[in-house]
Image: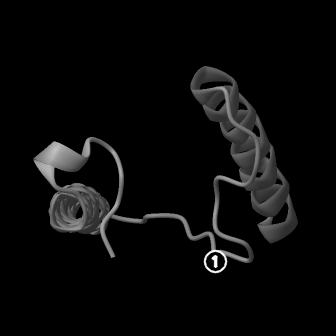
Amino acid sequence: MARVFSLAMKSVKLSSMSAVNRHRGEKGELWQPRFFDRALRTVSEYNEKFEYVRLNRASMRRTKRRAQRSKGGVERCLTHPSDGNRRRG
């Protein structure tokens, strides 16, 4: 039974990776290597994992926004309006 489940998960991962990469126009891995697949056995366990993923996605978006703002701040510090795109340094 475990072997069947493992093969099914491998198939799901490969097909979803192909679909996501095709949609994004990218190549490469989507899933974590050697990630431990586990069946969710109860509704409360499902809800717990769903909430974990939701919070991680929100955290990732905040981190990206912070990085973009930080990069913009660095860019503003390195350029002067009268210099156009020339960097100071």
Q: Please, is residue 20 above or below residue 45 in the view?
A: above
Label 1 sits on residue: 36
Q: Position of residue 26 (x, y in %)?
A: 69, 35
Q: Nearer the viewer, residue 61 or 2?
A: 61
Q: Position of residue 71 (x, y in %)?
A: 26, 63
Quarter residue 65 falls in: bottom left
The residue sitting at the front extreme is: 82
Q: Identify the residue at horizontal 33%, vertical 44% (top origin).
A: 85
Question: Looking at the rendering, in which quadrant would you find the C terminus?
Answer: bottom left
Q: Nearer the viewer, residue 71 or 39?
A: 71
Quarter residue 15 falls in: top right
Q: Identify the residue at horizontal 13%, vertical 46% (top origin).
A: 81
Question: Looking at the rendering, in which quadrant would you find the N terminus?
Answer: bottom right
How many other residues sit within 10 Å of disc 1, few (<14), some (14-19) or many (≥20)?
A: few
55 on left or right of 40: left
Q: Which amino acid, mark 1?
A: Phe
Describe the element under mark 1 as helix, strand or loop: loop
Q: Identify the residue at horizontal 27%, vertical 57% (top origin).
A: 57
30 on left or right of 70: right
The residue sitting at the top extreme is: 23
Quarter residue 75 falls in: bottom left
